[in-house]
Amino acid sequence: MGSQSSKCETMMKAEVEGVDGFVFGSHFLAEEIVTHILCLEDVETIKTCRLVCKNWNALISNRYFWKKKALVESKHWPNVPLDNTIPWTLYANIYLNEPFERNLIKNPCGKKKLENWSILSEGGDKFTIEQPPSGSEKIPHDANLENDLDDSCFATSFHSCSKEQTIQLSRLGLTPEVMDDYKPCITFTDWYAGRFDCGCVYECQFLLLDKSKKIIEKFEHRTTIKQWQGNTWHKVSHRFTDYSAGVRFVKFYHGGMDTQFWAGHYGVKLTGSSIKINFL
């Protein structure tokens, strides 16, 4: 009898351990209900909940959990495959950092003046912000502006004005494994225009960099708009796919000047700068 009782106790203990985290008092809650309850908590609480038991840790360390949490909060969930080979931490970072299908460039139109930009050159009368643009057509709606009411842009002067932003992908949760194994598409976009009365020069560089910030791949564009022909907005865009392994940073550079050397801000206008990452 002793051995039989011990065997029964072992089986009961195994059963209890198997439902640990799903039994509350005398009530058993289905996994789906516990998952939904956990989704309602804030991120710091969820991190603590991972330590409660193995079952809760397994629920939270599940790629479906983070998609469900995003949907519960009516947050956009990108078109990312729910692939078992992709680390669950990527899906957690999708919720936390939103690395996909949004503009990663901060202050793309000058709404916050030159905030978030690294200024490389400010020749002539330096950069200025125009709202609305002076001497050019109205900014197109599809120029990827921050909102429909924002019609601002950067304007350059009679000597080179240039600026850049560099984004560290790991800070968005895009780990080396994700970048090297899955190579999500990286799309750069920029908009530029001249004035009706003055020519200008525009240039840009879109760069993929390794951990030492050495160039892996790049796209360059430079053009001159002639005097009396420059008030139309132009879009320049490039998509990087199937790039070499090792991409850890992306850099966006653009700038320009006028061709008449007029005092003031008669050089190229810049707006709608964008870097977007997505799965094809």
Image (cartoon, rainbow, N blue to C red):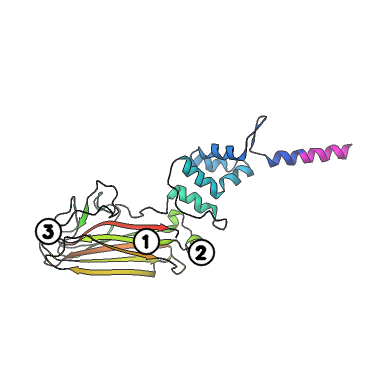
> Mark 3 highlights which residue?
264
Secondary structure at badge 2 equals helix
Q: Are marks 2 and 1 in contact (CB under 8 Å)?
A: no
Secondary structure at badge 1 equals strand
Is 195 located above or below residue 41 in the figure? below
Question: Pointer 1: residues within 10 angstroms few (<14), some, or many (20+)?
Answer: some
| Residue 277, numbered label | none
First in sequence, mark 3 or 1: give its number.
Answer: 1
Q: Position of residue 166 (x, y in %)?
A: 35, 60
On screen, residue 218 versus residue 81, left or right, reads left
> Which residue is at a point 56% across and 48% down the rendered structure image?
62
First in sequence, mark 2 or 1: give its number.
Answer: 2
Secondary structure at badge 3 equals loop
First in sequence, mark 2 or 3: give its number.
Answer: 2
- Locate the N terminus by quadrant: top right
Query: Gap between marks 2 and 1, in whole Å?
Result: 18 Å
Is 28 located above or below residue 100 in the figure? above
The amino acid type, in three-letter code, at marker 1 is Thr
> Mark 1 highlights which residue?
187
Q: Which residues are magenta?
A: 1-11
> Which residue is at a point 81% across and 38% down the rendered structure image?
8
The amino acid type, in three-letter code, at marker 2 is Asp
Query: Gap between marks 3 and 1, in whole Å?
Result: 33 Å
> Mark 2 highlights which residue?
181
> Which residue is at a point 14% across and 54% down the rendered structure image?
134
